[in-house]
Image (cartoon, helix red, strand yellow):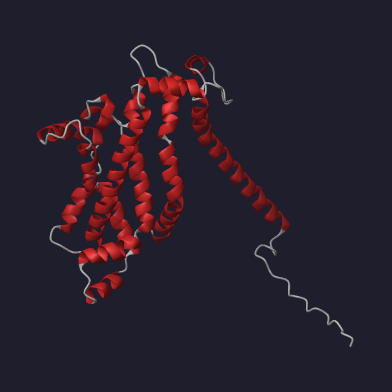
C-alpha cells in the first residue's frame, strides 16, 4: 500500500502591526526605544551605585572609608561585625524593631481598611466633615506632634515602653485615606447588598468579602508602613530611655561616639537593618505592582 503525501496547506502569512510602516519610520522607532532603555539603564545604575557602595564600605576599615572611595569589596567585614557587637547588641535591637514594625503594620492595615470601608460604603451624619478632618491631619508635620505625644505618653505612664510606638498605628490618616480610595474602586456595592440580603453582619462582610478584595491595596500600604515603622528614629529616641530597649536604627546611631565615628561598624549595622525591608518588598512586590497598575487604570 503506497501512501501519497498531500501538499501541505500553506498558512496565510500573519499580518503583524508595523509591517506596512515605512522602513525609516521603523528605524526611528527602534532608535527611540533603544534610547529609552539606555536612559532607564543609566537611571537604574545611578540608583544602585549608592546602595552597592554602602555594602562595599561595610567590608573596609574606618580609616579606608574616610580616606578613599572604591567599589571593590575589602576584607574587614568580620572585624567590623565583631567591633559592632562590642558596642551594641545588634540582634537585640533587631528583635525590638521586628516587634514594633510588625505590630504597627498589622494594626495600621486592619484599622485603616476598617475606617476606609466605613467612609467609602456607609453613610452617616457628619461623614464629610469627619473625613475632611482626617485628610487635614495629614498636612500637619509629625515633628509638631512630638511634644504633645511625650506629654500624653507620660500621663499614661507608658514612657520607656513600646506601646507609644505601636498604638498610634490604629489612627493612621494616610492609611484611612488610601483604603477609602481602594474601596471606592474595588468593592462593588451589589456584592455588599447581596451579602446583607443573605443575612451577613457588617463585620462578617468586612472580614470575608472586603478584606480579601483589598489584597493589592493592603500589600502596597503594608510595605510603606513597615518601612516607615522600621526606619523610625525620632520617636524611639525620645520615648525610650533605656539603651538596651532601643530599636535598631537608634542602636546603630549609638555606635557614633562624641569625638569619632566607627564607619565600618556603622555600615555593618546599616547593612543588617536593610535586610528585612528587602525581604518584605520581594514578597509583596507583585501585589504592589498590580495594586499601583489597577489604581492607575481606575484613576
Residue 190 drawn at (x, y percent): 29, 73
Q: Is residue 168 left or right of residue 222?
A: left
In depth, the one of 27 and 143 nearer the eye is: 143
| Quadrant location, the N terminus | bottom right
Q: Is residue 93 left or right of residue 157?
A: right
Displayed quadrant of residue 10: bottom right
| Residue at the spot 38% in from the left edge and 20% down from the top edge | 86
Q: Residue furthest bottom?
A: 1
Displayed quadrant of residue 293: bottom left
Q: Residue furthest right?
A: 2
Q: Is residue 59 left or right of residue 143?
A: right
Residue 235 drawn at (x, y percent): 25, 32
157 over 260 or under it: above or below: below
| Residue at the spot 37% in from the left edge and 52% down from the top edge | 219
| Quadrant location, the C terminus | bottom left
Residue 73 drawn at (x, y percent): 57, 25
| Residue at the spot 73% in from the left edge and 71% down from the top edge | 13
Labels in figure, total: 0
130 over 100 or under it: above or below: below
Residue 164 drawn at (x, y percent): 20, 37
Q: Residue furthest top?
A: 259
In depth, the one of 31 and 131 nearer the eye is: 131
207 over 68 or under it: above or below: below
| Residue at the spot 33% in from the left edge and 44% down from the top edge | 225
Amino acid at each position: 500500500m503506497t501512501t501519497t503525501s498531500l501538499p501541505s496547506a500553506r498558512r496565510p502569512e500573519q499580518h503583524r502591526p508595523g509591517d506596512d510602516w515605512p522602513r525609516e519610520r521603523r528605524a526611528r522607532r527602534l532608535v527611540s526605544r533603544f534610547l529609552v532603555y539606555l536612559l532607564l539603564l543609566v537611571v537604574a545604575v545611578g540608583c544602585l551605585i549608592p546602595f552597592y557602595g554602602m555594602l562595599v564600605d561595610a567590608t573596609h576599615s574606618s580609616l579606608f572609608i574616610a580616606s578613599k572611595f572604591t567599589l571593590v569589596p575589602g576584607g574587614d567585614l568580620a572585624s567590623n561585625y565583631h567591633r559592632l557587637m562590642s558596642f551594641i547588641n545588634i540582634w537585640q535591637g533587631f528583635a525590638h524593631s521586628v516587634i514594633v514594625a510588625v505590630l504597627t503594620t498589622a494594626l495600621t492595615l486592619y484599622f485603616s481598611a476598617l475606617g476606609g470601608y466605613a467612609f467609602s460604603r456607609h453613610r452617616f451624619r457628619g461623614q464629610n466633615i469627619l473625613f475632611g478632618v482626617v485628610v487635614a491631619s495629614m498636612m500637619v508635620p509629625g515633628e509638631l506632634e512630638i511634644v504633645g505625644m511625650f506629654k500624653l505618653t507620660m500621663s499614661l505612664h507608658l514612657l520607656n515602653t513600646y506601646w507609644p510606638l505601636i498604638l498610634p498605628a490604629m489612627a493612621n490618616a494616610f492609611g484611612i485615606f488610601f483604603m477609602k480610595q481602594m474601596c471606592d474602586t474595588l468593592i462593588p456595592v451589589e456584592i455588599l447588598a447581596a451579602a446583607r440580603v443573605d443575612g451577613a453582619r457588617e463585620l462578617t462582610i468586612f472580614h470575608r468579602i472586603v478584606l480579601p478584595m483589598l489584597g493589592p491595596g493592603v500589600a502596597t500600604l503594608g510595605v510603606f508602613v513597615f518601612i516607615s515603622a522600621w526606619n523610625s528614629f525620632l520617636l524611639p529616641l525620645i520615648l525610650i530611655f533605656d539603651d538596651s530597649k532601643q530599636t535598631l536604627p537608634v542602636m546603630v546611631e549609638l555606635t557614633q561616639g562624641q569625638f569619632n565615628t566607627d564607619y565600618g561598624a556603622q555600615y555593618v549595622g546599616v547593612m543588617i537593618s536593610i535586610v528585612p525591608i528587602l525581604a518584605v518588598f520581594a514578597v509583596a512586590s507583585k501585589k504592589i505592582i498590580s495594586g499601583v497598575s489597577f489604581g492607575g487604570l481606575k484613576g
